[in-house]
C-alpha cells in the first residue's frame, strides 16, 4: 500500500515541492524575525510566535488569504492542465529560469535532486524550529 496507488505521482510530487518551497521561505522568515529583521513600525516588533496574533489583530491575515488565494488559483490552473489537460509540464516547473540554469539535462537533474532534498529538510526544519520556539519561549537559537 502506498499513496501513489491512490494519488497520481505527479500530484504528490507537485505537493511535495510546493510545501517544501513554502517551508524554505517560512524557516528563513521565522529565524530572520527572531534575529531582529522586521518591517518598520512598532506592530512588527514581535517574536515569530506572536506574529500570527498581531497580524490577526491588525487585519493582515485577511490580506494574506486574499493574495495567497489568488496565487493558488493560478497554480491550480497549471496543476489541472498538467494532470488532466495533456500538458507535458513537470511537477513544480513553472518555466521560470531567467539564468538558464536548466539548459543542460545533467545539470537540471542534479538541481532537481538538490531541490527536493532541501525541500524535505526544510519541512522538518520548520516544524522543529516552531516547536522549539514555542516550548522554550525564546528566540533564535531557541535554547
Image: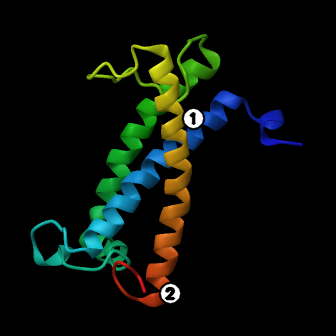
* Type of colouring: rainbow
Q: Which of the image's four quarters has the C terminus?
A: bottom left
Q: Which residue is mark 2?
A: 135
Q: Position of residue 93 (x, y in %)?
A: 46, 25
Q: Position of residue 97 (x, y in %)?
A: 33, 23
At numbered mark 2, what does the secondary structure look like: helix, strand or loop? helix
Residue at figure coordinates x 55%, y 18% from the top left: 81
Answer with left or right where residue 139 lies relative to residue 6.
Answer: left
Position of 92 relative to 86 (above/below)? below
Q: Position of residue 12 (x, y in %)?
A: 65, 37
Position of 6 relative to 30 (above/below)? above
Spatial separation of the CA atoms under disc 2 and disc 1: 32 Å
Looking at the image, can residue 95 be seen?
yes
Q: Nearer the viewer, residue 55 or 45?
A: 45
Position of 34 relative to 75 (above/below)? below
Q: Nearer the viewer, residue 60 or 12?
A: 12
Answer with left or right where residue 11 lies relative to residue 2.
Answer: left
Answer with left or right where residue 43 lies relative to residue 105.
Answer: left
Q: Which residue is mark 1?
A: 14
Confirm or deny contact between disc 2 and disc 1 (CB under 8 A): no
**Displayed quadrant of residue 96:** top left
Q: Nearer the viewer, residue 31 or 65?
A: 31
Give the mark count: 2
CA neighbours of label 1 inside 10 A, class few (<14), some (14 to 19), many (20+): some
Q: Earlier in the sequence, mark 2 or mark 1?
A: 1
Q: Position of residue 71 (x, y in %)?
A: 38, 38
Looking at the image, can residue 19 be seen?
no
Residue found at the far left of this picture = 40
Q: Nearer the viewer, residue 100 or 61?
A: 100
Amino acid at each position: 500500500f502506498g499513496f501513489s496507488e491512490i494519488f497520481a505521482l505527479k500530484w504528490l510530487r507537485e505537493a511535495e515541492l510546493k510545501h517544501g518551497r513554502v517551508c524554505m521561505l517560512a524557516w528563513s522568515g521565522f529565524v530572520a524575525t527572531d534575529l531582529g529583521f522586521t518591517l518598520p513600525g512598532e506592530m512588527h516588533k514581535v517574536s515569530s510566535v506572536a506574529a500570527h496574533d498581531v497580524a490577526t489583530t491588525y487585519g493582515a491575515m485577511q490580506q494574506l488569504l486574499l493574495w495567497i488565494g489568488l496565487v493558488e488559483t493560478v497554480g491550480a490552473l497549471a496543476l489541472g492542465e498538467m494532470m488532466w489537460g495533456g500538458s507535458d509540464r513537470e511537477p513544480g516547473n513553472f518555466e521560470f529560469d531567467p539564468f538558464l540554469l536548466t539548459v543542460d539535462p545533467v545539470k537540471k537533474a542534479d538541481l532537481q535532486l538538490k531541490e527536493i532534498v532541501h525541500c524535505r529538510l526544510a519541512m522538518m526544519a520548520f516544524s522543529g524550529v516552531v516547536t522549539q520556539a514555542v516550548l522554550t519561549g525564546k528566540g533564535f537559537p531557541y535554547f
